Each structure stands twice: as C-alpha cells, then as structure tokens.
Amino acid sequence: YEHPNYVPLVRRSFDRWYELERLTGRHLLTECGCLSLGLPESEVVAGVKQAAAQHGLPVETLAASDLRRRYSQFRFGDDYVGVLERQAGFLYVERCVQAHIAAAVQHGATILPDQAVRRWSANSKEIEVETSREVHRAARLVIAAGPWSGSVLGRYGVDLRIMRQTLLWFATADDRQFQRDRFPIYIAEVAGGHYYGLPVIDASGHKVARHYGAPELRSPMEVDRRSTADDETPVRAFLDAHLPQVNGPLRQAQTCMYTLS
C-alpha cells in the first residue's frame, strides 16, 4: 500500500527468493494471502487498490459481510472493508540471512564475524576499512549497515532515523483457527494506528505488532531492546477490539528497528 513503485521490486524479489532457495536448498519464502483492512478511504485500502490498478494485480475487495463470513476471527464494523492479495507471503528472516551468507561463501566471499567497523576512508587508489581487529583494503566497498547506516554515512548528507518496534506473540483460543489455510497475513488501519499479524506457524502463537507509531531516534544505541508492559498495552487493545480469540498470555516478545529516511 505504501507506493505503486514497490510492485516491480516485489515481483523481482519473488524470482530471486525462489532462485536462492534452489541454490541453497533452504525453504525461505512461504506464500500466503495478505488482507488489508480499513475504511474504504484509508491509506491501507486505497493504497493497495491504487497499486493493484496500476500494475494489473489480482486483488479481491471484501465488504464487511464478506469478512465476517470468510474470516470470522476478525471483528470489524460495517464501515470496514478488506482487500485480499493472494500473491503475498512471509520470509523466514534468519534463514534468509544464513542462505545469503552460504551462497556468498560458495562464490568466494570471506565472512569476518564479530568485527565492528570503526571507520572507513577512500582515495583515488583504494578503500580502507578499519575494524575492531584489523585493517582491510579493497578496490570497492558496499555499505549495508542497516540501522547503523546513518552514523556510517551521515557525513555524506544521509539523514536516517531509527524507530524501535516490538513484535509480540500471543496464545489463541484455538491455534487451528489461525493456521495459514484459514487465516491470512493482515495489516489493519484502525483509530489507534496500523497493526499487522501473521498466521500461527509454531508453538509461539499469533505474531502481531504495531506498524510505526513510535518516536524517531537518532541512533541504534538509543533503542531499549527489552520489551515492557507499555509495548503490550496498545497491541492488546487492538486484539481485544478486533481479534478477540487472541486472548491468551503473552508468550514471546522481541524488539527490532525500522530505519527511516
């Protein structure tokens, strides 16, 4: 929903994930429908429809009565609608990182774990990278520093901010009702913000999180990696209102970081 320009990137990424699965023999991408929920004029619903129309994507619009019939796990008023994308899915992120590393090594890369980059510089002849253990010199440098990119690239006018996000897993009344043959990936735009969740795929239960809605920070060092009761409160309120069967105890919590331009 964020912009139609993402669609060609996503289409290409599906091809590349399948290719990486074939090269490494690892299951990385699980296809699963994605349901966007909101008022007809909401950013989520209108954005998906705009992208689908521009790129000829097959999506299905569901009225409130359709939502109640097909996905009875949800509770939304008659003014809400859903847009279902069948060409969607989720990635096993840790496996993806491991697969990329394995493929890189297979192609001749050397992995140097636990070496923090202290600084880097470049001149007309070479690039120099100083780490916590040694100095490396090379002809080319690719910086993929994630949330640390702002501090690494800030002197070049790249102003990046960090947003702390919390992922929560809750027990459900019946996990079978939230398996991916019965329950989609979803993102819902409600009065309290945007919330997203995934089907139950293991013993941790239903994974759900708030999308955005937190302060922007200057550095990853400002991020508190512990989860607190304040992280649970707005998510629990969303579940009580719209997914009442996700009413069990909190089973797991993790923090992650968004990097924002």
Image (cartoon, helix red, strand yellow):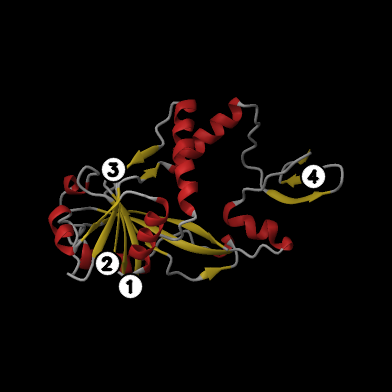
Residue 50: x percent and y percent?
A: 39, 60
As measured in the structure, the alpha-carbon distance from the residue carrying label 4 to the one carrying label 1 is 48 Å
As measured in the structure, the alpha-carbon distance from the residue carrying label 2 to the one carrying label 1 is 8 Å
Numbered mark located on residue 192 in the image: 1
For badge 1, the amino acid type reads: Gly
At x 20% / y 66%, what residue is drawn? Answer: 76
What residue sits right under mark 3 in the picture?
Answer: 201
Mark 2 residue crowding within 10 angstroms, few (<14) / some (14–19) / many (20+)? many
At x 46% / y 36%, what residue is drawn? Answer: 15
What residue sits right under mark 2 in the picture?
Answer: 238
In this view, the mark in front (3 or 1): 1
For badge 2, the amino acid type reads: Phe
Labels 2 and 1 touching (C-beta < 8 A): yes
Numbered mark located on residue 128 in the image: 4
Going by the image, does 27 lie left or right of 239? right
- Identify the secondary structure beneath mark 3: loop
- Identify the secondary structure beneath mark 2: helix
In front here: 64 or 237?
64
Instruction: Identify whether 237 is placed above or below 133.
Output: below
Sequence-wise, which precedes: disc 2 or disc 1?
1
Instruction: Identify whether 257 is placed above or below 33.
Output: below
- What is the tally of numbered marks visible in this picture? 4
In front here: 177 or 84?
84
At x 18% / y 58%, what residue is drawn? Answer: 67
